[in-house]
Amino acid sequence: MAKNEPVAYLTGEWVPLSELKVHVHDRGFYIGDTVFDLARTFNGKSFKMKEHIDRLFRSMKAVRIDPGLSPEEMVGISEECVRRNEHLRKDAGDWHVWQAVTRGVAGWRELPTKATVIIQCVPIPFKIYASQFRTGAHTVIARTRSYSADTIDPKVKHYSRMNFNMADLEARDVDPQGWPLLLDQNGNLTEGTAYNVFIVSNGVIRTPGDNALLQGISRGAVAEIAERLNIPIVQEELQPYDLYTADEAFITNTPMCALPVTRADNRTIGDGKPGPITQQLLAAWSEWVGMDIVDQAERYAKR
């Protein structure tokens, strides 16, 4: 194994990242029978790891996968993965800590099997979004809809996401840099393909409720920060109109925390600049984790 190659956990063993493979007959590969989660580090220290693992175990409970590990063991292995790859972090900046659990190798309708457990550290792709902290991201409301809760509860974080792939392609047809947003079956905003959406109107942060979206850990962090800053935040049904007419908007996920949004369907949001409340949230988040989130993203995006 090369000295500069990360190591990863694969069902009880530590292997070089290049050897992190699943069998072609693994149900996670051939029918998407996988749940996963994704934490990150700040300056090499994990952030809300327990919350991510708790969400992973809720997903596994919902789809009836037994990982053969306790939540505490999963946290411990995830933290060990970070430690084992610390010598490579200088070049990466910080890590995604990615846990995935498949039902395992089995045939069609053969459910009794041993789960495949994968935990890996992957460099955060800062270059994808770093420049948009200053200019704001562009969003596009896709034609493809979110899965209905009657099909699969969106609170389960799973790999069966062809609708997300289609939404991403549709957004790029409209704007090559567009971040897709999905609607539910009634035309309400739900979420993006890996992020939650927020708008700000008259000083109030507003975000869709839990009925048709993943309960993001970063979404919860926004609520914590807003409470500390005495900024009101509400969950309610939101339509495209609300996004188009908002004073400001932003999207949240684990790597980028809170990314300003300045356009939606080629319409300018607010004054076309990242909004003051979004900037407040980012500043408070940076203070919380002990580093400048925007500065780090911009520095490592150039590498």
Image: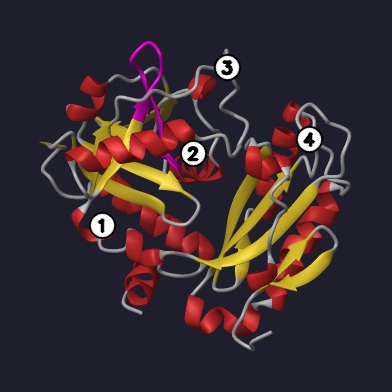
Q: Is residue 68 visible?
A: yes
**Which mark, residue 107?**
4
Colour pattern: secondary structure
Q: Nearer the viewer, residue 112 or 228?
A: 112
Q: Answer whether residue 188 is magenta in the image.
A: yes
Residue at image position (67%, 46%) is 51
Residue 76 placement, left or right of 257: right
Mark sitting earlier along the chain (1/2): 1
Residue visible at 42% across and 39% down in the picture: 193
Q: Nearer the viewer, residue 252 or 27?
A: 27
The residues tagged by marks 2 and 4 sit, at their Cα atoms, a distance apart of 43 Å
Q: Are marks 1 and 2 in contact (CB under 8 Å)?
A: no
User: Would you say 132 lies left or right of 88 here?
Assistant: left
Secondary structure beneath label 1: helix
Pointer 3 residue: 151
Q: CA distance from mark 2 to mark 3?
A: 28 Å
The Cα–Cα distance between marks 3 and 1, rounded to whole angstroms, is 34 Å
Q: Give the residue number, with chain letter if any, for mark 2.
A: 223
**Relative to 219, is 95 above or below?**
below
In the image, which is nearer the foreground, mark 2 or mark 3? 3
Q: Nearer the viewer, mark 3 or mark 4?
A: 4
Work out whether mark 2 precedes mark 4 in sequence or the reverse, and give the earlier one.
4
Tag 4: Cα neighbours inside 10 Å, few (<14), some, or many (≥20)? few
Whether residue 276 sits left or right of residue 282 in the image: it is: left
Distance Cα–Cα, label 1 vs label 2: 22 Å
Q: Quadrant of residue 186?
A: top left
Magenta stretch bounds: 182-197
Say which label, 2 or 3, has the lower sequence index.
Answer: 3
Q: For the residue labelled by badge 4, is the local secondary structure a helix, a strand or a loop?
A: loop
Q: Earlier in the sequence, mark 1 or mark 4?
A: 4
Q: Nearer the viewer, mark 2 or mark 4?
A: 4
